Image: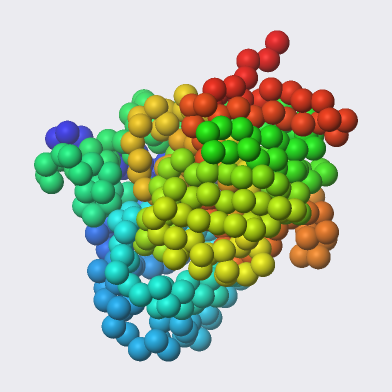
Amino acid sequence: MEPQEFQHYLGKYAQLIVEFGINVQPGQTVVLQARVNQYPLARLIVKEAYAKGASEVVVNWEDDFIQKETLLHADEKVIGEVPEDVMLQGKRLLAKGASRINLVSSAPDAYAGVPQERLALFQQATNKKLAGFRNAAQANKVCWNLSGAASPEWAAKVFPELPAAEQVPALWDEIFKTTRIYTPDSIAAWRHHRDILVAKAQELNAEQFNALHFTAEGTDLVVGLPKNHFWDAASSTSVSGVNFMANMPTEEVFTAPDAQRVDGIVKSTKPLSYLGTIIEGITLTFKDGAVVAGHAEKGDEVLQSLLQVDEGSRRLGEVALVPDESPISQSNITFYTTLFDENASNHLALGAAYAFNLQGGEKMKEEELIAAGLNRSQVHVDFMIGSPNTNIDGVRADGTRVPLFRNGNWAVTE
Ligand code: ZN
Ligand code: ZN
């Protein structure tokens, strides 16, 4: 691709993120989280946000090299603590109802080699720093968007077989394909895509299954669904009525499981990058909603520490359906980042459920959400369980079954 052409598509991408991703409203504050090597895209996003009437765009720069040096060598106290001024800034932005864009570009194993105890401290500090935003986001009080941006480190992991000079362009090409940037009117294409997913979610909402039964190689799992659970698709609407797209790309419809009614065994089908470590070959056994045995062939230490974060990190907070014929699945590329890989595959998440996955959940208190069966936790970590041989039955309250997925794809209904 010629540099000028690339610049054109990057501009379209920035516009999509601002106009459709967070759907910036006049007078709004926008927070942009970006790695320093993504400055060309960050500049375009800032420009676009002001052009759409944003009153303030705050850019938080990060760098994985510096972060890793900090994790390796800084005083433990520094790693485990969130300075007061950082907490205050978070509060100030939250009070303004700031929208948030996060550009995902890190290498999946950016922090490989950092001792587990130091990573755990960092995780605690990060959870504390983000708790306010996470609660607001899970209740749809703010608009937010996660989008990908190709970095040399990430691209090298995704395309190790390509010469170094071709890796970053190849990853950008995949990002542009999966976010519909090559279509003449990307935003119109996204609206159409959104409508299809929303229709699927509506069908499932009308059914109100009591449980889903997953079977595949190594998997035989019944996931209970709470009464009045709500299937959501790509698109979200904030409590102030602004329509936004939290993830780009997205191919999923998802809801909250009943955190007390998950039983059986499940095997992951794709690697998962968590805290800069790759976790592979996860097997989890559930009883009454909780993991009673868990193991990973690779990255087991990190999995064990995840399962011990809190009571909720051993229970499920999301069940998502993605057909195997989705474009990301068909690309057969492992992106080593949840944002992309979750859209290639059915997935579950350990940790917090989204309040909006229960009818009226946004307005409920924590105790009410828990009573309804929704999981609460400091974490939310997706792992992929889809495969071409996955079958799923929807189980109704009277025990009758409806085929939902056959051989990895939506079962054809008559
Ligand atoms: Zn998901
Ligand atoms: Zn998730």
- Quadrant of residue 347 in the image? top right
Dividing the image into 4 quarters, which one contains the N terminus? top left
Instruction: Tell me the residue at 69%/22% (across/down).
Output: 403
Find residue 73 and report its horizontal and vertical position in percent. 29, 83
Instruction: Tell me the residue at 49%/61% (across/down).
Output: 303
Instruction: Tell me the residue at 42%/31% (across/down).
Output: 329
Find residue 278 and report its horizontal and vertical position in percent. 37, 55
- Quadrant of residue 211 in the image? top right
Extreme residue toward the top, this view: 414
Dividing the image into 4 quarters, which one contains the C terminus? top right
User: Of residues 105 and 242, which is closer to you in this image?
Assistant: 105
- Quadrant of residue 113 in the image? bottom left
- Lateral position of residue 90 relative to residue 414, left or right: left
Instruction: Tell me the residue at 25%/69% (across/down).
Output: 65
As displayed, is residue 389 above or below residue 98? above
Find residue 141 and report its horizontal and vertical position in percent. 65, 58
